[in-house]
Image: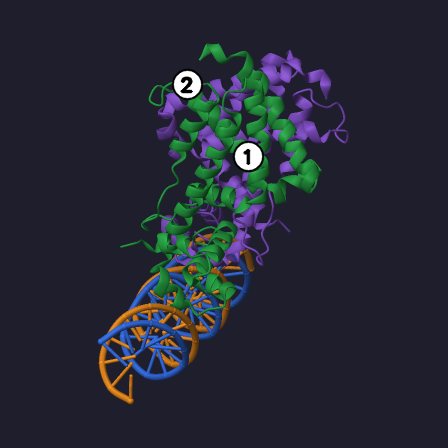
Chain colours: A green, B purple, C blue, D orange
Amino acid sequence: MATPLEKARRDPNSMKAKILTSARKIFSKNGFSGTTTRMIAKTVGIDISTLYYHWGEKADLYNAVLMDTQEELKQELKRIEKIIHGKPLPSRLEIAINESCDYLFKNSEITNLILLNYFTKPKGKDIAEFHFIDIITGIAISMGLAMDKDKITKQAKARVMVVMLSLFNFIAGKKYLSPIIGAESQDYLNVVKETLNFILIPAFVQDKKTI
Amino acid sequence: MATPLEKARRDPNSMKAKILTSARKIFSKNGFSGTTTRMIAKTVGIDISTLYYHWGEKADLYNAVLMDTQEELKQELKRIEKIIHGKPLPSRLEIAINESCDYLFKNSEITNLILLNYFTKPKGKDIAEFHFIDIITGIAISMGLAMDKDKITKQAKARVMVVMLSLFNFIAGKKYLSPIIGAESQDYLNVVKETLNFILIPAFVQDKKTI
DNA sequence: ATCTGTTTGCATCAATTGATGGAGAGATTA
DNA sequence: TAATCTCTCCATCAATTGATGCAAACAGAT
């Protein structure tokens, strides 16, 4: 028996998949409690009962969106990991920053969704959590901050966290931050990359051995 | 004619002030759309009509909370600014990180509120915005990244942004991040400080002249 | 005590929202 | 054709939520 999510992934033209796509956009814009099932149904062009037929209750749909997004992000990180594998650390960092910025900018719902899931969690409801730890661990190893999956220090994890959260915030908060910084679209993207490089490379390259 | 907010500040025992205090806690926990006026009224121990009598509609109360919090944060930044004034840059950074971490940890509603206001903004409603730009500007100058208030480069602003967002995220996301990092309460606080120092000091101290 | 203005809570509204039952439309199979 | 299965929408529910009218309680001044 395939889960609804598996079915949706199998056929991108199915109603399940269409709903999932719209739901991702809308949840990422408004968060869980800011989104109504009617909003989603409307953008798909269907009745809410059709939505409930395919996905069950709101929290189930939300969880499916979250899992789907998470899976996609993991795939992308694997892709980047392949590119940088074997290169010296400074290049690794620069390429990783460059690639992940480009990807996340094009798919900014991902960061929105994650950060919102993170900050606004409706209690009582049975909401899934984003598996941050996997991602952090993967990055830490590929950045050379740790050798073993199970032997990553608190410090290393915290440092990777800064990288990730900074990037996520810059992207999810683009709309607010770009007027503050005074740079729009492509210009903004470049400032972000530049800033991340500026801050991260000296810290990680120099003091790598101290961890 | 004093605004409701001014009245509340004047007398901390007034009903207005009590409501404001509870509202801050609850809004910072659940965001705007995740909070109901009934939740707030309940924790104060009053009827919602009393709440409406004092603060008008929900958005007005929310805005008051936001303004109040913002003012408080600005005062705190001024206090820190006084402490670090005149000291050499590395000490300035370290003390500023230390002081602001301590303060924000003790008052974590502040960061929650700001980040939520930031990411989950109900459209249509007339919701105030946090004045990030003032704070960014102030920090940039006190960090020596800019001399003139009006002559701050995009790069400088972006760099300050990283510092601020990292700190805010670490605090607002404490609940989620501390199990990931593997450090609780005081230990977590120390890791955060250490990490911010690690990442920021080399970058800012070395390359200051390049801006 | 009486008057006046402020504060508070009960009762209630209309709108929104999550969720469901059931009746059809359409395709597929027997 | 008849039976079955899948899918879609209309109508509707109960609960929640933002918001208000009104009367009672209260406090201070005259």
User: Residue B37, located in which quarter of the rendered image?
Assistant: bottom left
* Nearest to the observer: residue A26 or residue A32: A26
Q: Where is residue A21? Give x, y as percent.
A: 48, 55
Secondary element type, mark 2: loop
Q: Is residue B96 left or right of residue A119?
A: right
Q: Where is residue B192? Give x, y as percent.
A: 46, 23
Q: Amino acid at mark 2?
A: Ala
* Nearest to the observer: residue B14 or residue A178: A178
In the rendered image, which residue does mark 1 sit on? Answer: A100
Determine crowd level at label 2: few under 14, some 14-19, many 20+ residues with C-alpha closer than 10 A.
Answer: many
Q: Where is residue B143? Give x, y as percent.
A: 65, 21
Q: Which mark is residue B65?
A: none
Q: Circle 2 marks a residue in which chain?
A: A
Q: Rounded to the nearest whole Å, what is the CA distance between mark 2 and mark 1?
A: 21 Å
Can residue B72 be seen in the rendering of this structure? no
Whether residue A175 is situated above or below residue A138 in the rendered picture: below
Residue at 41% across, 42% down? A71
Determine crowd level at label 1: few under 14, some 14-19, many 20+ residues with C-alpha closer than 10 A.
Answer: some
Q: Which mark is residue A146?
A: 2
Q: Is residue A115 left or right of residue A191?
A: left
Can residue B57 be seen in the rendering of this structure? yes
Label whose residue precedes the other's in the sequence (2 or 1):
1
Q: Where is residue B93? Give x, y as percent.
A: 59, 18
For the C terminus of chain B, the quadrant is top right
Residue at 36% across, 56% down? A7
* Nearest to the observer: residue D13 or residue A160: A160
Q: Amino acid at mark 1?
A: Ser
Asked whether the beta carbons under mark 2 and mark 1 sit within 8 Å of each other, the answer is: no
Secondary element type, mark 1: helix
Residue at 38% across, 32% down? A134
Q: Is residue C6 left or right of residue B156?
A: left
